[in-house]
Amino acid sequence: MTIKDIAKACGVSVSTVSRVLNNRPDVSEAVRRQVMAVVDRQGYIPNNSARDLVRSQSDAVGVVVRGTGNIFFSDVLKTISREIDAAGYTMVLRQIGSDEDEVKAGAILEREKKLRGLVFLGGRFDYTPPELALVGVPYVCCSFTNCFGTLGDDDYASVSIDDFRTAYRAVEVLLQLGHRRVAALVPSSEDRSISQLRCRGYLAALADNGVAFDPELLAETGGCFEMEDAYRGMSALLDSGADFTAVFVLSDTMAMAAMKALHDHGRRVPEDCSVIAIDGLSMSEYTVPTLTTMVQPAEEMGRESVGILMGMIRGESGPRHLRLEAQLRRGGSVARAPDRSV
Amino acid sequence: MTIKDIAKACGVSVSTVSRVLNNRPDVSEAVRRQVMAVVDRQGYIPNNSARDLVRSQSDAVGVVVRGTGNIFFSDVLKTISREIDAAGYTMVLRQIGSDEDEVKAGAILEREKKLRGLVFLGGRFDYTPPELALVGVPYVCCSFTNCFGTLGDDDYASVSIDDFRTAYRAVEVLLQLGHRRVAALVPSSEDRSISQLRCRGYLAALADNGVAFDPELLAETGGCFEMEDAYRGMSALLDSGADFTAVFVLSDTMAMAAMKALHDHGRRVPEDCSVIAIDGLSMSEYTVPTLTTMVQPAEEMGRESVGILMGMIRGESGPRHLRLEAQLRRGGSVARAPDRSV
């Protein structure tokens, strides 16, 4: 049913129906009641995209999620959705694959929905100013920064953990328990992205603690953080005969696959090999043994991202960069290094 | 940059720019080049919602996903997205919580985006015709049917497994291995939805195999399929001292939490208790032990849903109802019932 059908059914003009639907004062109460009765009876829902074109400002805030299968993002998204609602705006969501272009998706969404602002949940770390010129509204990078790119600090806002430091701390947990042969399982050591940052943290922790880096212990899985790649990478490391008593894994789901590979190779976790990861999914509390992991503050990340964005939309504050602290959640996958008589 | 800015920059009229952007033939090649040069340089993206209002038909197909944290749905969604693309349409995605109204979300999306059709990925099983009258385009229910509702078979299309039969077969796997004390872990036995259907399958399998139903072994967790609820429900069942050697669990993620509860109570899987579930997530191949589960054909479900919808949109075929077969994937979580001298 269109606005024309309603006008016809009520015997009034289209513009009168439109005035009723937009709560304008210049309509008599009798006509308002008559129109709303038809609207309610017929289940008419206003065509918002048409209305947005007429209104000077929409209330839409876009969220582009990169990586549909990323379980960590679902947790953050719940908070983002609630906070946008609470601020009196409407969330418009677009999910894209890990190999798609979030900037283009955001720019298209901006034009389609007349966005007031944008949250990128996941994205590349190496934007250039011309690329981001496509985006004409304030935006916040949630869970990542532009540390491999050329944006100025005033060009964008970001909320994330410090990936380098969090990896550093995770590896230190292992070193403090006496581990010296510590492997790393990451998609890539030079992807100009999260994997490279966390790999650097691993290397720095080894160096600062006087442990020589053994290239044999760096297992690069390739791919997009898939469990299948992690299982294969961990199995290859085990099959290579490399000697290690602990492994630092890029993410929780990759760590689940790594624990499975260890189990299938007859290695007990944590007795024969300790496992530590970064993410802190709720799901990781249900692995056997419970995964020890650095918890990213999903709720705080979502809340702060929307908070910063609202300040920018309302013109109250400029772009800011917030680094949040990850917290170690001790599970049962990390133990003291086995005693070795050398 | 708007279409007006481009017109001004090129010294041509707005309607000329519009003709270029819409690939109309009535523009000279020189003007076309000039306009596109500005468009390319400035990164202008056409305002599709404005264009959709002018065009007689959009190419948008809506997908409403109910349950943002449902990992099974992410797998189906990948296929749906690819198939909609392949059919030459554009997917418009909306994700809502398990407690939200998918029909209303779909109806709003339909008006906003001038949808040609809709896929509901997850939803209620008890629609009434007046509720669905809100939706004015063809739609397919993916992963569920209307078996507790009053829609006629010609009113809607659906693609799903047979939940009753799949649960029945899962429980039979346990019974054939000699289990007689078989528990069930489900959110609810009377939610007029998936949980009730699978619970009925459990009860029927027991009855058909001459095993008396013991109400003590039916653990209802409440909630929306959360792992936390499943862990608590399984723990309560174990604490109650109930006697059982196997458990049928509604979903894979709930089964992961159940296995953890068994482990934390000192019960070995499968030696002391077998565990079987329904879903077949890729993730379940990485649990220790590997989960034995009835695999829903995620890819086929997505492909068939879009196929049926396309037939309806193009007026080539009417609504159909497709029941797909789930396949048993044997893992390591099910074993023969322990020998008991009674």
Image (spheres, coloured by chain):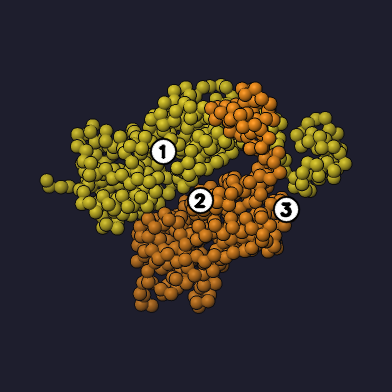
Chain colours: A orange, B yellow
- Name the residue rendered at 52%, 72% in the picture: A205
Percent position of residue A229, x then y: 49, 53
In 3D space, how far apart are the residues under numbered discs 1 and 2 (Cα atoms)? 26 Å
Q: Which residue is mark 3?
A: A133
| Disc 2 with disc 3 on a shared chain | yes
Label ID, residue A81: none
Q: Is residue A51 visible?
A: yes
Label ID, residue B296: 1
Give the residue furthest to the left. Answer: B342
Q: Is B102 on the left or on the right of B279, as rendered?
A: right
Residue closest to the eye, B282 or B226: B226
Q: Which residue is mark 2?
A: A78
Residue closest to the eye, A315 or A218: A315
Q: Residues within 10 Å of mark 3 (few under 14, many from 20)?
A: some
Percent position of residue A73, x then y: 52, 53
Q: Secondary structure at mark 2?
A: helix
Nearer the observer: mark 3 or 1; the answer is: 3
Above or below: residue B254 compared with residue B176: below
In 3D space, how far apart are the residues under numbered discs 3 and 1 (Cα atoms)? 44 Å
Is mark 3 in CB contact (under 8 Å) with mark 1? no
Query: In which chain is the residue bearing label 2?
Result: A
Nearer the observer: mark 1 or 2; the answer is: 2
Amino acid of disc 1: Gln
Query: In which chain is the residue bearing label 1?
Result: B
Q: Is B247 on the left or on the right of A322, as rendered?
A: left
Amino acid of disc 2: Lys
